[in-house]
Amino acid sequence: MTQHEPLHLHVPEPTGRPGRHTDFSYLRLSPAGAVRRPPVDTLPVDTSDLAYELVRVLDDDGAAVGPWAMQPDRELLRKGLRAMMKTRVFDARMLIAQRQKKMSFYMQCLGEEAIAIAHALALDPGDMCFPTYRQQGLLLARDDVDMVEVICQLLSNQHDPLKGRQLPVMYSYKRAGFFSISGNLATQFIQAVGWGMASAIKGDTRIASGWIGDGATAEADFHTALTFAHVYRAPVILNVVNNQWAISTFQAIAGGEATTFAARGVGCGIASLRVDGNDFLAVYAASQWAAERARRNLGPTLIEWVTYRAGPHSTSDDPSKYRPADDWAHFPLGDPIARLRQHLIAIGAWSEGEHADTQKQLEAEVAAAQKEAERYGTLADGNMRSAAEMFEDVYKDMPEHLRRQRQQLGV
Amino acid sequence: MKVDTETSADGTAAGTRSTPMTMIQALRSAMDVMLERDPDVVVYGQDVGYFGGVFRCTEGLQAKYGKSRVFDAPISEGGIVGTAVGMGAYGLRAVVEIQFADYFYPASDQIVSEAARLRYRSAGDFTAPITIRMPCGGGIYGGQTHSQSPEALFTHVCGLRTVMPSNPYDAKGLLIAAIECDDPVIFLEPKRLYNGPFDGHHDKPVVPWSKHPLGLVPEGHYTVPLESAAVFRPGSELTVLTYGTMVFVSEAAARETGIDAEIIDLRSIWPLDLAMLVDSVKKTGRCVVVHEATRTSGFGAELTALVQEHCFYHLEAPVERVAGWDTPYPHAQEWDYFPGPARVAAAFKRAMEK
Ligand SMILES: Cc1ncc(C[n+]2csc(CCOP(=O)(O)OP(=O)(O)O)c2C)c(N)n1
Ligand SMILES: [Mg+2]
């Protein structure tokens, strides 16, 4: 008979809590430029090391270094910086509008701007993203999405393209490669795989890009998505945005303790990368690598983007209750906007003056869009889509019982 | 209105000292009492541990009982309920939180195929004495994924008990009864009632529970037995069968129409207190069924059928149903969707005219 100590339950705990600094050494960062770049036709099993390292391009001085530094053209980088700044300005203004009760709710992507924006710029027209609520950057990076209309969705007003039915930020833009956002976490991840499979079935050349947060990877749909993507070698990029937090729970509660989310992919036979999500150049390079694999029929790639959720989870959340208030300031991967700005200035493609001008211009642009959107109503003034529209789109053609209910409502 | 004075299962009077509590505090108090009394009770769910839940129902419990009794769970409803079933097989009583009722769907298989049928399929060898708490209902501009009332999806499953309190007193007593119950209990919490009774007049300021007699809650252990309804408002002209938020909306409709409605708060939706329902409908001869969930195949359909089966010869008018429209819960048009006092009042009048 063996003698054992009594068992006890392990419940992971972050090092940082209100009043106690986070020890970020758990992130296990690789130095910029240190991680190899395999050929796109590499075997998934041969990316095992990459799933535990961290692909980084920008070093502390803003220089682009190492095998992933491909130096995309300057115009693209300037566009990326502008889009990140625009997204941040947009988030800040919408947050104020929410406080003014012009909208019921808002979610910002503060600190994570590089991921959606660099990724969007690495995709082709016609590709389809299956985002979460924190990828507004996918829309704001594009020139063909009208900001006024986006704000109308947030304000739930007369011109809300979703007819007032969805919470703010739950956008849908098929024509911009942006799948309708679900409130139910993780459901979109497996759908992205299905879209990619469809593209393969039809002999198309378009690829899918699925998105999920660190917390939501605990859902079964995440794991199912990996299995299907691997089995059918689906042309899909599987993005895991590890911003360290899922509302109040730390990424270790999602299963990130002493391992990585990228490692999940390798275990399923999927080529996997772990990438500095606050490094615009690294995001762009890794996205391109994964897109190339998908488009060449080489199958899926899982990318864990390491970043930090700098703001509250949503306007209903108060993170000072569960994490150090100044945590972001200590996050070792910094601020994606500051880092790209530093790089662009270093290579002579940007200046402090241009930055200040751009900031002003973007603030004016967003303010003007908001002003115009508010002409069509806000949640506060009740100028919204008619109640009659509530009964539409439940089915393609309205059945008798809904017609009768609409009549009963008297609209 | 009647304040229940049930006694607890072990016969002690329903608490000697009472304190004003919100529904959130009452639920927390129930879990606190049970964690204290029964070392086999554990509490977990998303954001439930350190933070104390997004609605703060478990605030302070981890600090008091430690991380192996009250803890955060990964975002996997299937995982949360599946582990609860496993813990039940070991002998624990898991009280788990699904952050919003709208998010229980990934746990459907564990609830429907496993928890609900475990006793039956193992002929009592294993049971699933679990309590699955979930905030439900609308009225907070939550849109279609923070507003649903899925009770009928559970009442259709044999082996589950489905409960929905309408006030702090019942919330605590029912939650303790649910935790002590050896069957799996789906415990639906109308989130619009968390901080005060809400009668559907959304433009009026919130009345806190401290101003309501049912906000006075005994500090200790007591139960509101499962399968017992309550006469929330005695009346003679018609019977209202309802639960959750709609109890207060129905009360407002009675006040505003001057119709002397007898409002029955089911509390336990299924299995239910049939005798109380039948007695009331036989007495008044008229019946209006009210719930916030969508109408078609909602629990109102079952209630209407029961009334028809048991009270047909006493009915003086067809049974009226007031419910949410058969659409997903819209965001901006929330108050056109929500079956407020005007819609309930209109049904009262129709029931009286015939
Ligand atoms: C199925 C489901 N369960 C729970 C929730 C509630 N919820 C919304 S967001 C969230 C946290 C998600 O965290 P993460 O996936 O890390 O994404 P992040 O918010 O950090 O971008 C939770 C628990 C939900 N929306 N859907
Ligand atoms: Mg997260």
Image (cartoon, helix red, strand yellow):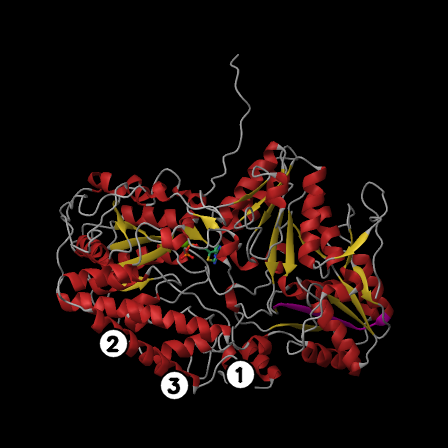
Q: Between residues A63 and B271, which one lies in front from this camera angle?
A: A63
The secondary element bearing badge 2 is classed as helix
* Residue at point 23%, 38% (across, down): A49
Label 2 belongs to which residue?
A357
Q: Earlier in the sequence, mark 2 or mark 1?
A: 2
* Residue at point 28%, 78% (across, down): A361
* Residue at point 73%, 52% (across, down): B172
Mark 2 chain = A
The answer to whether marks 3 and 1 sit on the same chain is: yes
Does the segment drawn in magenta span residue B291? Answer: yes
Among the 4 quarters of the image, the one containing residue B258: bottom right
Q: Which residues are magenta?
A: B284-293
Label 3 belongs to which residue?
A372
Residue contact between numbered discs 2 and 1, judged by CB atoms under 8 Å: no
Give how far apart the Cα atoms at labels 2 and 3 are: 23 Å
Looking at the image, the residue that sits furthest to the top is A1
